[in-house]
Amino acid sequence: MSAPPIPRELQQQLAVELSATMAAIHHRGWCDGTGGNFSCVLEKSPLQLLMAPSGVDKGRVLPGELIVVDGQGSVVHGQGRASAETLLHLAIVTETGAGAVLHTHSQAGTLLSHHHRPASDSGGLGLLRLEDLEMLKGLEGITSHATTVEVPVLVNDQDLRRLSDAARPHLARAPHGLLIAGHGLYVWGKDLAMARRHLEIHEFLLEQHWRRLLLAALKR
């Protein structure tokens, strides 16, 4: 049986919040140009996502310009194309129960996803280890800095169905985020506010990681 539809006023509020979130992320320099894609679950059954259309400046998308896509990634409301990466959003939502997925192309995320890209004999998976940082506690479920998380790093693939299938086995154990080699960061949360928190934490941790790599290189 389908879940009752979200009241129209709540849909409108979610659109306002997603538009504002994208503008804030763009302001941070994490989705320059037409980079990045962002979604919120609008309906769970049947599954529908509220998203920005593909190929536009995500910092300038108004609430009324957002599109709605169904569980197959097809646009069912609004103007514009859905990103090919919608399929990865859908995989994350269905595998983790996330209420929002945020994808950025920050310098740190792109750099480190390439640096920690999978080795040829890894079976298509690399890992970025993050440990002993207080900011780890910003990730839901972590209560101490004295911990280690491993962010999956997947090989990039223009076939998004294949990439989504490759990501699925690693999502449950991922620390609310994963990297695509040479491409960037995906994070998620139970709702938009939590996803944005996880994004800010991951971006901080990525910045710390590459700066540590730089310091280590300077000491040699």
Image (cartoon, grey):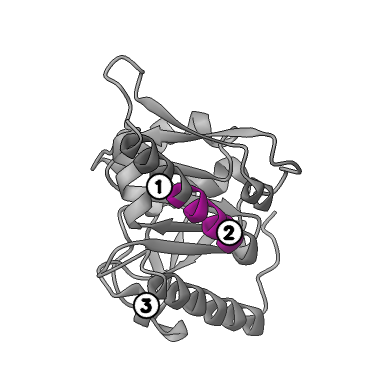
Q: Earlier in the sequence, mark 2 or mark 1?
A: 2
Could you tell me residue 74's position as x and y percent? 37, 59
Q: State whether the magenta stretch is mostly helix, strand or loop.
A: helix
Q: Give residue 68's quadrant in the image.
A: bottom left
Along the horizontal axis of the image, is 202 left or right of 77? right
> As shown in the figure, which amino acid type bears the numbered disc 2?
Ala
* Element under disc 3: helix
Label 2: which residue?
195
Could you tell me residue 188's position as x and y percent? 55, 53
Q: Give residue 45's quadrant in the image.
A: bottom right
**Figure quadrant of the C terminus:** top left
Q: Depth-wise, is mark 2 or mark 1 nearer the camera?
A: 1
Mark 3–mark 2 Cα distance, whole angstroms, equals 17 Å
Quick one: label 2, few (<14), some, or many (20+) residues within 10 Å? many
| Image vertical order of residue 204 relative to residue 163, above or below | below
Label 1: which residue?
211
Quick one: label 3, few (<14), some, or many (20+) residues within 10 Å? many
Quick one: label 1, few (<14), some, or many (20+) residues within 10 Å? few
Q: Is residue 40 magenta?
A: no
Q: Give residue 44's quadrant in the image.
A: bottom right
> As shown in the figure, which amino acid type bears the numbered disc 1?
Arg
